[in-house]
Image: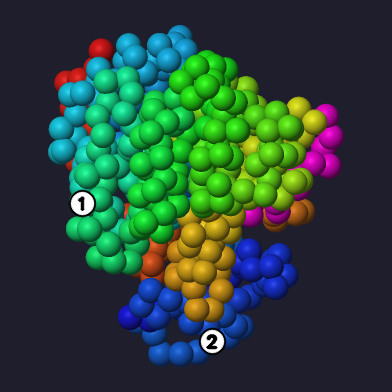
Amino acid sequence: MKTLIKNSTLVSMNPLKDKIEYNKDILIEDDKIIKIEENINDNVDKIIDASNKVVMPGLINTHAHIPMSVFRETLDGYTLQEWMRQKIWPMEDKLTNDDIYYASYLSFIEMIKTGTTTINDMYFMTDSIIKAMKDTGIRLQTTRTLMNLNSSFDKMDELKELIKNYKDKYENLTFNVGIHGLYTSTSDYLDKCIEFAKESNLPIHMHFCENKEEVEDIKNIQGKNPTDVLKEKFNNHKMILAHCVKLTEEDINKMKDMNISISHCPVSNLKLGCGIAKIKYMQEVGINVTLGTDGQGSGSNLDLFETMKYTALLQKGVTEDPRNLRAYDVLKMATINGAKALGLDNKIGTIEEGKLADIIIIDINDVKIKPVNDLISQIVYNVKGNNVETTIVNGKILMENYKLNNIEEQFIYNECEQIINRIAI
Ligand SMILES: [Zn+2]
């Protein structure tokens, strides 16, 4: 199967190329990008005309809880801990495998329609999440959340089983070891999780220092400062740390030589009243900063264009310097930096010959995007998820000209309404 994208304005995110290239054709064969040139005239099965449109890599969301789509807007008036204990955990106890499938399906539709092609997930009943991934065609990195405190049980065998059953089964599926946090596991159990991550050569995905209460809980349970626990236990293991809101500059300095990526989730952090992570400083000391939405329960939606705008504005505001966090750096966070965090930067994150075809096409014929003085700034500040008109993952066209292929949207919406009607508290 060969697909040719014609006449694009290309923002490839390839550091060796110009930030914006004009009149580029992109030839895709099966799952891969095989040629990027002007005026390609090969025999192909499908031509997509991208004249006056922007072609860029699909966005990469490095922290989410995919089935939490059904908990959208249940948070108003609660703190994080109250919301979890009084609403989320009792509702989650009622979720069935079918519920997880439909709730995940809803999130995957949302991603396809808003230009995100890869997501890093942390939840449970992962088989059903993987089934929805297979049926929608999205790219997924997932796990089975591990913790052993707060009446949770050790699920490491479940994670081992998942990895055994699905390893190398789908090109768009990879795994990591999801440790819920330093405050929901005992010290011995953390050691066991780290050992497993080393044995299986997988990155660790973990919540870290999201709010004040969490930092206090970590000190009480682990007997140390969170950053010291991290340094002593995890050494140089590859990690994706979500949030990191409460880190001081001193903490960040301690972490800068570790093999970590930060998943910055500004919308969720603001909504939960957690504060604002020191992203500018992290970036300055060389930490790989990426973007996440968190679950829609706290993050509202999976639109990473919205996340990019918050990221840029917040850092300019808190540092009182508008020169900080240039638009192109924010775009890197949502693409190639995310790919690096997930260990997939040799496959995705840029549009380059030889990489997998995870590509989105943006229609800039929109009043907010006229006139185009600076296209990169336009993408960060004025493009929204609903300006994405075509989404391609692993060479497959999942949405073309705003129309989803092989997806029954209304049916999924109805199923999700029924789930929340049944389990709502
Ligand atoms: Zn989270």
Asked which quadrant contains residue 316, the reply is top right
Q: Residue at x 34, y 32 (%)?
A: 147
Q: CA distance from mark 2 to mark 1?
A: 46 Å
Q: Position of residue 234 (x, y in %)?
A: 51, 44
**Residue at mark 2:** 40
At horizontal 65% and vertical 42% (from top left) the residue drawn is 255
Q: Residue 47 or 115: which is nearer the viewer?
A: 115
Q: Is residue 149 visible?
A: yes
- Disc 2 residue type? Ile
- Which type of secondary structure does the marked residue at label 2 adopt? loop
Query: Where does the image place residue 242, in percent across and percent down from the top left?
Result: 51, 37
Residue 232: percent from left, percent from top: 56, 39
Q: Quadrant of the C terminus?
A: top left
Coloured how?
Answer: rainbow
Disc on the earlier residue, 2 or 1: 2
Q: Residues within 10 Å of mark 2 (few under 14, many from 20)?
A: some
Position of residue 393 relative to residue 303, above or below, is: below
Residue 334 belongs to magenta span: yes
**Where residue 251 sits in the image (x, y, percent)?**
68, 33
In the image, residue 136 sits, relative to residue 129, either above or below, namely below
Residue 292 seen from this side? no
Q: What amino acid does circle 1 point to?
A: Glu
Image vertical order of residue 14 relative to residue 265, above or below: below
* Residue stretch in magenta: 320-335
